[in-house]
Structures are given as structure tokens and as C-alpha cells.
Amino acid sequence: MDFGPVFEDWEADLGRTFLVGHAPDKQAIIDELEKVFQEAKRYYLSKPNMTGKELFNYVIDCSKQHGWLYGGPHAGHLIGVFPHEKHLGECPDNYICTDNNKPMNDLDVKGQKRHWILEVHLVESERRYGAFYEDLLTI
């Protein structure tokens, strides 16, 4: 489930994977999602001036350490004024990705703190199934 509630002019973003039925192998990947998320969040909070590229690479490595592939083109994005795609654009500086060499704690064009969503996309080694978790990184 991926929720994007809008509060007045501000958007939020929250995502979780749930399993319907009984499949221990699929439940195992779901059980790792929040662990990878929390490790990546702790890493970010210990070095908030890191670049989006650095955090993206950490999430990939952390996923591997937990026994999964990372399955997304990025590991999160800026959040704020709705809709963020229209206001922020598709610039790599707005995503936690390999092309973002800008410090994540840089201020926005209005001199305000930027807030980030961290996304974890885990995939099973043969790419038959995956799972997703996203939540606020900076708050």
C-alpha cells in the first residue's frame, strides 16, 4: 500500500507491504524492510550532510547484507509542496540516487530545510517477488 495524503498544500508519503495468505519466504522479505529502513535512517542521522548518492549506495549495501537485492531506481525523494513532481521536477538532486551529489541537508531555494522520504525496495534474488517500505527520513 502506498499512501500520499495531502494536508492543505503539503503532501506526505507512506508505504508498506502486506502479505495476504501464508508464504513464509515472502513474509521473510517483508520482515526485513523496516530493519533496512531503520539502519539507513540511523546512518543518515549520523551524517546528515551526506549526498543522495552516498545514502543510495548505503541502502543497496544494507539490502545485500540482509540477503536481498535492491530493486528501485532511487531510495527516496524530497517531500513538501503538493504535487512535488510539479514543483521539484525530475532533477537528480530531488532524489536519493546515484546522480545526486548534493548534500541532502542543503537548504531549498527558499532557504528552508528540505525533508526527505526514504524508500526501501527489496527484491528476492531471482526477482520473482519483492517488497516496499517508505516513510519520513528527516522527521
Image: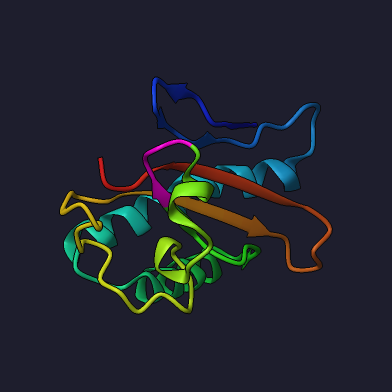
Residue placed at 39% from the left, 27% from the top? 9
Q: In the image, 26: left or right of 9?
A: right
Q: Is residue 16 left or right of residue 109?
A: right
Could you say which quadrant of the image residue 44 lies in? Answer: bottom left
Q: Quadrant of residue 52?
A: bottom left
In this picture, residue 86 sits left or right of residue 39: right
* Secondary structure mostly seen in the magenta stretch: loop
Percent of width and height locating residue 78:
39, 52
Residue in front for this viewpoint, 38 or 117: 117
Residue 106 vs residue 30: left or right? left
- Taking the spot 74% from the left edge, 68% from the top edge, the residue there is 125
| Quarter of the view holding residue 77 | bottom left
Q: Measuring from the top left, give residue 122's x and y in whole percent.
A: 62, 57
- Quarter of the image for the C terminus: give it: top left
What colouring style does the render use? Answer: rainbow
Q: Which residues are magenta?
A: 78-82
In this rendering, the answer to whether 39 lies above or below 102 is above
